[in-house]
Image: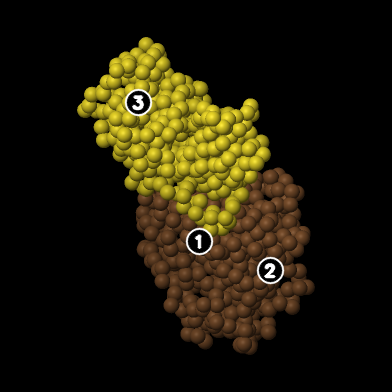
Chain colours: A brown, B yellow
């Protein structure tokens, strides 16, 4: 079978780690597989290169930054190939460009347009293990070297798995898989043996750091099964895959709880209650390139104004507030409030589609833990709440217990839930 | 004018050095030149990468080693481009492959076959400073990344200067130019303002480390004028160029003194005085891939045998001796002697062609300094002697003084010399 494996920076942090990973790769080859490996830069290499760039230029040109940063994966790929050769197997390393990873020309955040893996196919045909430098490609238009944005080696791996018709794609890191919640917060969190693409997307979009969002989108679109597992053990991890309606009924209603402390909440107070007022607010924010997450509009009060709250990445907060304040008179609102002492907790599970009462269970569990909810938003398979950042851990634990996810516990069943 | 500049590793060792070099480059651009820069890896980067490779594999595959090492120049090229952009100019970095440096496929020691500088021409046409990663290219046959052998960034620079029709090629390092002798040995050594290709070749081939031999050969073949100078000052350095017969008569008879402590001397004793005996000896040594430098065959003595002495790189000594000893009975010689406690001193100057007595001056100067000569070899413009390694410094000084090269001194004129 043809197999794609991806190893993150912590798995190849030093010579000893590289040799350990090499052994794992040749084991897969020895079992009769054709193996293609995508590798990240060693340990902190990317941060060190960024630091060097900063010393030379506070605002390095993105084209040159990509040229610099791609050296990191090039080095780890070459070293990994050497280590495999040293074990008596043959391996060949390729840059993203050589591997045929064709991208848009947006330096620092390019998207994969196409994969033309002719050289990889040739090397596999000659019996070689193929090592590909992750995170990088070549622009279709300019022929310049591009990077796909940080953490995007996962995406390279899935894209190559799709292009090569691989049986599956293994993503190796230093954790054992996807858990029902962050085990540092919930000691009883359990490894999820398998999870649907949709659920993994919701977890990744709402703070779970284990897989890059774009990687999961790619896997869903191309129907690539992804096995998330640890390079430090041989235990099975989490399979991200298509799960049929019939299979999913046997799974728990809720698959996992994600949390995110990176957002802030903006409230625009005293917005005139007229058609187009909300559009004015969000046009203003969009014009400075800020991505909005949750939005809540309060019902009109007596004075015919509304309050509009939304969340956004903390890094974008000052920019959004400045833009809004500059537009205050034109839009006609009273004031803005900014709160970065918030956190978001999200309950995710396809079981919500068929089981009523999930939101009630969630809100009651939070109330029982004396946690105030500042905002709520939902999708078909997710409920997210914004709470005080100091309440995030307690909220995650309360939901984890309420939906019966604790390894040694029982579900706390409230009236009206589907269980 | 179109100008090619090459900066060595010591000139770009850290962020501050890179910024300093960037300023020098934009100064050249501001004077109305089109500037193409070839850059080596920062400081000790190449050694650090080699060390990393050793940790992973004691015998790394050359293809992968090239993939690894080329990251060094890629990083310095990108950083230098950033630093130039930061000064308000536009610069674009290119790998050897992107710059069109087409080579043979011999990893670690590839030769430049062709330069196809289409992307460089485009960038120059758009007003950019072009930065090219030195020391690297791409194999014409395999399309794999190759390196040209250590120190070969100089060759890349000269080859690009020829391909781009540049007015000249500046080679920047941490020394002020080519000197009449190593200033650490001869405090009165002087900078040579200009030197012919032939003389520079002889100096480079006989221990002067300032320019790579292959670079000088390339410059002579393509008639590229090379300016060797320091990146730490704006003083003129040494021009390596074609010097006409008329110009050269005004120059000193002797241009410079080179020395080399890296060789060893092998003597094969008791070689039968028959046709083909010398061929047998050197075939044996050549068969194990050893390059011979000087050869001296003694006149036959009473017992109809000869002694053959030759010099070779010290690193090749054990291999050559082992091969000879294995062939002793077949060839019929008595024994081998090995001496790595030797050094070579070479007196170089085109003036020898027209001035008799140079060798006499040289030998008398050495005799006056009580230095014993073990071997002698000559070319049309060079006299080399092998002496005890402890006599090398004294021999260099004696010759330097004898040929009037000391900055404050006068030539020691012996009867029979041309002066």
Furthest residue toward front: B302
Q: Chain of mark 3?
A: B
Furthest residue toward top: B246
Q: Position of residue A409 (x, y in %)?
A: 61, 88
**How packed is label 2: few (under 14 Cα within 10 Å), some, or many (20 or more)?**
many
Horizontal relation, residue A250 to residue A66: left or right: right
Q: Which mark is residue A239?
A: 2
Q: Chain of mark 1?
A: A
> Which residue corresponds to mark 1?
A43
Q: Position of residue A416 (x, y in %)?
A: 65, 85
Furthest residue toward left: B408
Nearest to viewer (mark 2 / mark 1): 1
Mark 2 to mark 1 CA distance (whole Å):
25 Å
Nearest to viewer (mark 1 / mark 3): 3
Look at the numbered disc 3 and give the secondary structure of its residue.
helix
Please state, as top left, top right, bottom left or bottom right, where the C terminus of chain A lies in the image. Answer: bottom right
Mark 1 to mark 3 CA distance (whole Å):
59 Å
Residue A279 drawn above or below residue A117: below
> Which residue corresponds to mark 3?
B362
**The one of B269 and A381 positioned closer to us in this rendering:** B269
């Amino acid at each position: 079978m043809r197999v794609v494996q991806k190893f993150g920076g912590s798995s190849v942090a030093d010579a000893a780690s590289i040799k350990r990973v090499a052994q794992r790769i040749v084991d897969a080859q020895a079992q009769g597989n054709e193996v293609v490996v995508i590798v990240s830069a060693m340990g902190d290499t990317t941060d060190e290169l960024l630091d060097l760039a900063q010393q030379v230029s506070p605002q390095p040109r993105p084209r040159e930054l990509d040229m610099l940063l791609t050296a990191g994966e090039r080095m780890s790929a070459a070293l990994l190939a050497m280590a495999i050769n040293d074990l008596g197997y043959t391996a060949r390393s390729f840059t993203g460009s050589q591997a045929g990873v064709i991208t848009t020309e947006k330096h620092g955040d390019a998207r994969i347009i196409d994969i033309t893996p002719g050289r990889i196919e040739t090397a596999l045909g000659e019996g070689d293990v193929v090592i590909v430098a992750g995170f990088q490609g070549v622009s279709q238009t300019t022929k310049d070297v591009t990077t796909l944005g940080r953490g995007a080696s996962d995406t390279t791996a899935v894209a190559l798995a799709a292009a090569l018709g691989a049986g599956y794609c293994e993503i190796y890191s230093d954790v054992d898989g996807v858990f029902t919640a962050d085990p540092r917060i919930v000691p009883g969190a359990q490894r999820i043996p398998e999870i649907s693409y949709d659920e993994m997307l919701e977890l990744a979009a709402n703070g779970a750091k284990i897989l890059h969002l774009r990687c999961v989108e790619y896997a869903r679109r191309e129907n690539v099964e992804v096995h998330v597992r640890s390079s430090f053990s041989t235990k099975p991890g989490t399979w991200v895959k298509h799960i049929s309606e019939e299979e999913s009924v046997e799974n728990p209603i809720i698959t996992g709880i994600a949390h995110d402390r990176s957002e802030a909440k903006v409230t625009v107070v005293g917005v005139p209650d007229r058609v187009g007022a909300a559009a004015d607010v969000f046009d203003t924010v969009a014009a400075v390139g800020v991505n909005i997450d949750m939005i809540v509009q309060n019902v009109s009060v007596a004075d015919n104004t509304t309050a509009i709250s939304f969340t956004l990445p903390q890094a974008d907060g000052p920019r959004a507030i400045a833009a809004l304040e500059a537009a205050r008179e034109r839009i006609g609102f009273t004031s803005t409030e900014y709160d970065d002492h918030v956190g978001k907790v999200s309950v995710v599970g396809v079981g919500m589609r068929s089981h009523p009462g999930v939101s009630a269970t969630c809100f009651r569990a939070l109330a029982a833990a004396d946690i105030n909810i500042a905002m709520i938003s939902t999708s078909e398979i997710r409920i997210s709440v914004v709470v005080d950042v100091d309440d995030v851990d307690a909220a995650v634990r309360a939901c984890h217990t309420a939906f019966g996810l604790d390894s040694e516990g029982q579900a706390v069943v409230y009236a009206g839930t589907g269980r």
